[in-house]
């Protein structure tokens, strides 16, 4: 056959060798995270113990979840590696697949492909202070990151950790139990904010960029990680600039419409990068050189 | 890369048209043969049925032979609801095939597709078809006025990546075997070995074809995208005319974007397919939230051209455009990539 | 045509420099023989590139919906004028937004037929009086222009619109064929077979949709995911659904300009489909897409007050 520079043929039939085939997972827990019902977490367990045992991921990575007959969509992994036997995703109900996922119940079977993408560069962050900034629904992979960082054998490797997380209203904040636990820890400086004043709200009021300015995490020897909707990212960046964070020390996790998750179908490209393969975690030093495609 | 790295010319034979037709007939008995066929003025690569005629007209075809390795519609797997769970069956395995009559520009395009699909996490469907397909390419003796393969570093007689390479000498074919598979196929035929005069005739035809094409002028390495290029009014001017259809993407031999979609059947069964897609469609990058990172034609046109001239090269080391000119011929509003490339040099 | 072209350039230049329009939509010479392409002229210099010829394949009215908020001078042959009528009836554009530069049309040349019938490569082409002159490497070929018009043009009965400006004398043209010819005589099975064969080579590039001034929906039905009306890709079911529903959406609106089939890279005969439906609508509801800019649309939905 014609010479190819690469590879033996791989059988089509095993997910291990055919990355388009989903692994089957069963829903073990569902939980509505937001007061309007639009954000819901699903915990999944692999049907095949072997596939479950060989599924390893790092904070920042994502998977595609299939509702057979409706389609696939991609979600950042919200649980931390080894946190429990299974994986957690938080789904925002926007399109046909996410609506179908919201209608599912404990015991239903869906498909999972992944993990995809790069992870937060913890080796790079080690030894430094961290400012973790999240807005709204984008806090999912930041949960995975923070649960990992706050483990007793991991926490000492990092300096000060400041977390700034905002949502429209108190009811839209994700992961209330985790937030309450972190609020009383003395090894993380947690700032919670909502857009407009709310009754009995003891924390901050204001958009995330304003609270970042107020919290003023020290930029020297620090990395910032910012995840949120495009508008929030646009207004937070100048605040971080002013605080002295250079582009190579500000990281983000990009959202793009995705399909294959493997860097083949082309859909999620931004310039020469595929968000699914070279990202979704990027530094602004990488992104600044690309066409402005917010 | 070719299996034979030697200074000897590859083994070659000279065959009559009748001998060649008999060979093609034999191939059709053993494999699915994809050959260029005329369909109401357009040339496309389709599986040859016994009564079909190969359209040996002027290369290249209207639509590239990309569909041989990346079918426009392909079933990834079928699923069936079974006892509270799901049963998944992958799509069809690849069958032995021949790509007959690929042009040298198409061979260079296959290198780009290999770099995307066979590298990294290999795409098993693509890899299987590549390994099961013999490629018989054809020299471009008379390129079209819209061809500019040479300007993009190509050659109308470039045979790399083919198993057999066919040159039409006018009254017979000169056949070269480039790989072991090619030698095996040819060896069975007992064709007359080529003589010096025939090789000379082929060389003359090659020189004439190259002379008819633009000089080599590979676009500058655009890995550092200058801001003047990204923000250039050029994109706006082109975009005003661009219809936002997928003609350029679908005729192109290097374009490879696809969509994945579920097609439910009945009673809890169905299939997941992938279909060609194009970044020129407005909805291509539209997110469920309503946000579109490439909201207007300007961003989309810029993305496609820069992908061809810069991004593919940054990812693979290979230029994303092979200069086949298919998009130039097919664009309904006569957007001419050659003009855009010339402008890009000036920016 | 030369004198008419000069008058067009002068008029366009005047409209632009006086600020009466922001852009003049017309055609300029293309980069390939037998091709002229749309031009958005925004300065008098650019207006100097305008041409009037038989190689101008697109329907310029297609670009109007992208020019919201701008005052547009549009070169309008019969094709553009008929589409404009429907766009105005359907409130997609405002009358005040456009200045119609009516030009009598002598038909668009069927370049695919010429390319199919000319084995040698056409290096250059020109229209000279009632002939088309082609130059190849070895020959000069002359073709009678009237016989090489697109079928849509041969069937056209309204090539000469009225406008804010009218360049040249209106030309009468008697249609010498009917686009839906022959369809009536075929049995349903024959018609289905012809339709299935013709559309079998569709590659779902949607050039037909994007070339059409009346396919202006921000989200086409084929792109809906909720519900997922039709399969994408090239399996016959999806392809046939696409073409049938598109024809239905065009029924009674289609201007019969043929821009769709000229845009199609596979040469699918598309006006044939929509035209049949046009005739049915006309038989049932009265005469159709003509050139009366004030005419009411046939189907008008009134919102109930209170």
Image (tube, coloured by chain):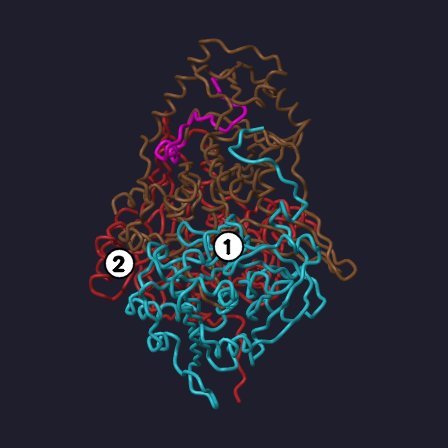
Chain colours: A cyan, B brown, C red
Relative height, residue B15 to residue A70 (above, below) = above
User: Which chain is home to disc 1?
Assistant: A
The percent position of residue A228, horizontal first and vertical second, equals 44, 69
The percent position of residue C208, horizontal first and vertical second, equals 50, 53
Region in magenta: B144-170
The percent position of residue A130, horizontal first and vertical second, equals 40, 66
Q: Quadrant of residue B70?
A: top right
User: Which chain is home to disc 2?
Assistant: C
Residue beneath disc 1: A117
The Cα atoms of the two marked residues, 2 and 1, are separated by 46 Å
The percent position of residue A227, horizontal first and vertical second, equals 44, 67
Can marks 2 and 1 be said to lie on one chain? no
User: Is residue C102 in view?
Assistant: no
Task: Say which element carries label 2.
Answer: loop
Q: Nearer the viewer, residue B132 or A179?
A: A179
User: Is residue C237 in view?
Assistant: yes
* Residues under numbered marks 2 and 1 in contact, where contact means CB atoms less than 8 Å apart: no
Relative height, residue B269 to residue C164 (above, below) = above
Residue C42's tag is 2
Other-residue count near label 2 (Cα within 10 Å), few / some / many at <14 / 14–19 / ≥20: some
Q: Quadrant of residue A187?
A: bottom left
């Amino acid at each position: 056959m014609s010479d190819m520079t690469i590879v033996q043929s791989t059988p089509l039939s095993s997910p291990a060798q055919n990355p388009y085939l989903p692994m089957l997972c069963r829903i073990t827990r569902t939980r509505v995270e937001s007061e309007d019902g639009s954000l819901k977490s699903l915990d999944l367990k692999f049907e095949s113990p072997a596939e479950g045992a060989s599924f390893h991921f790092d904070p920042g990575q994502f998977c595609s979840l299939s509702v057979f007959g409706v389609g696939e969509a991609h979600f950042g992994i919200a649980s931390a590696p080894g946190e429990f036997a299974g994986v957690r995703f938080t789904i925002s109900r926007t399109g046909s697949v996410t609506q179908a996922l919201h209608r599912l119940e404990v015991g239903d079977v869906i498909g999972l492909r992944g993990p995809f993408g790069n992870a937060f560069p913890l080796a790079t962050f080690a030894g430094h202070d961290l400012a973790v900034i999240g807005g709204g629904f984008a806090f999912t992979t930041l949960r995975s990151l923070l649960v990992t960082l706050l483990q007793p054998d991991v926490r000492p490797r990092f300096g000060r950790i400041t977390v700034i997380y905002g949502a429209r209203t108190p009811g839209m904040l994700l992961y209330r139990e985790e937030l309450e636990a972190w609020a009383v820890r003395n090894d993380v400086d947690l700032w919670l904010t909502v857009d407009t004043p709310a009754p009995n709200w003891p924390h901050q009021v204001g958009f995330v960029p304003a609270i970042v300015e107020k919290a003023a995490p020290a930029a020297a020897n620090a990395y910032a990680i910012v995840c949120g909707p495009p508008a929030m990212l646009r207004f937070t960046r100048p605040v971080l600039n002013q605080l002295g964070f250079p582009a190579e020390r500000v990281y983000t996790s990009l959202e793009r419409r995705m399909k294959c998750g493997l860097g083949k179908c082309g859909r999620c490209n931004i310039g020469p990068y595929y968000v699914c393969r070279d990202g979704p975690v990027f530094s602004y030093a990488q992104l600044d050189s690309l066409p402005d495609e917010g | 890369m070719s299996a034979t790295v030697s200074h000897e010319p590859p083994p070659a034979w000279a065959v009559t048209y009748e001998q060649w037709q008999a060979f093609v007939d034999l191939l059709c008995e053993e494999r699915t043969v994809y050959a260029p066929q005329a369909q109401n003025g357009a040339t496309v690569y389709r599986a040859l049925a016994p009564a079909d005629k190969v359209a040996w007209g002027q290369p290249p075809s209207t639509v590239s032979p990309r569909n041989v390795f990346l079918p426009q519609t392909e079933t990834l797997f079928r699923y069936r609801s079974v006892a509270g769970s799901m049963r998944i069956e992958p799509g069809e395995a690849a069958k032995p095939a021949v790509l007959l009559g690929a042009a040298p520009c198409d061979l260079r395009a296959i290198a780009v597709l290999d770099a995307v699909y066979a590298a990294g996490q290999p795409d098993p469907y693509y890899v299987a078809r590549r390994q099961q397909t013999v490629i018989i390419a054809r020299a471009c003796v008379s390129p079209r006025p819209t061809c500019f393969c040479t300007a993009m570093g190509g050659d109308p007689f470039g045979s790399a990546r083919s198993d057999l390479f066919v040159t039409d000498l006018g009254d017979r074919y000169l056949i070269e075997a480039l790989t072991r598979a090619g030698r095996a196929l040819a060896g069975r035929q007992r064709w007359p070995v080529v003589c010096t005069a025939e090789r000379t005739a082929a060389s003359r035809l090659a020189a004439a074809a190259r002379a008819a094409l633009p000089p080599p002028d590979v676009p500058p390495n655009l890995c550092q995208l200058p801001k003047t290029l990204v923000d250039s009014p050029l994109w706006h001017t082109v975009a005003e005319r661009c219809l936002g259809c997928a003609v350029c993407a679908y005729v192109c031999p290097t374009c490879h974007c696809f969509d994945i979609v579920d097609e439910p059947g009945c009673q809890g069964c169905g299939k997941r397919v992938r279909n060609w897609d194009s970044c020129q469609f407005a909805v291509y990058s539209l997110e469920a939230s309503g946000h579109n990172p490439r909201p207007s034609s300007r961003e989309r046109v810029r993305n496609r051209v820069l992908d061809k001239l810069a991004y593919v090269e940054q990812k693979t080391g290979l230029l994303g455009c092979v200069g086949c000119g298919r998009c130039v011929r097919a664009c309904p509003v006569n957007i001419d990539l050659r003009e855009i490339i010339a402008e890009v040099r000036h920016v | 045509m030369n004198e008419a072209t000069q008058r067009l350039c002068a008029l366009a230049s005047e409209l632009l420099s006086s600020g009466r329009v922001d852009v003049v939509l017309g055609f300029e010479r293309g980069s390939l023989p037998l091709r002229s392409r749309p031009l958005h002229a925004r300065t008098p210099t650019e207006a100097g590139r305008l041409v009037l010829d038989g190689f101008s394949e697109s329907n310029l009215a297609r670009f109007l919906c992208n020019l919201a908020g701008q005052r547009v001078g549009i070169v309008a042959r019969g094709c553009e004028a008929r589409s404009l009528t429907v766009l105005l009836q359907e409130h997609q554009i405002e009358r005040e937004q456009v200045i119609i530069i009516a030009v009598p049309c002598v038909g668009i040349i069927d370049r695919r037929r010429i390319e199919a019938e000319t084995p040698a490569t056409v290096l250059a082409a020109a229209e000279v009086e009632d002939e088309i002159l082609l130059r190849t490497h070895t020959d000069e070929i002359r073709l009678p222009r009237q016989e090489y018009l697109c079928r849509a043009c041969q069937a056209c009965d309204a090539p000469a619109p009225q406008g804010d400006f009218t360049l040249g004398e209106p030309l009468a043209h008697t249609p010498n064929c009917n686009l839906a010819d022959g369809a009536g005589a075929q049995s349903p099975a024959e018609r289905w077979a012809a339709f299935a064969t013709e559309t079998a080579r569709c590659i779902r590039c949607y050039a037909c949709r994007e070339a059409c001034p009346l396919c202006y929906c921000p989200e086409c039905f084929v792109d809906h995911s909720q519900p997922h009306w039709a399969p994408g890709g090239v399996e016959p079911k999806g392809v046939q659904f696409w073409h049938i529903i598109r024809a239905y959406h065009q029924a009674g609106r289609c201007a019969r300009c043929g821009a769709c089939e000229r845009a199609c890279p596979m040469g699918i005969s598309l006006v044939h489909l929509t035209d049949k439906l046009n005739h049915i609508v006309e038989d049932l509801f009265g005469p159709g897409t003509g050139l009366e800019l004030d005419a009411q649309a046939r189907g008008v939905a009134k919102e109930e007050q209170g």
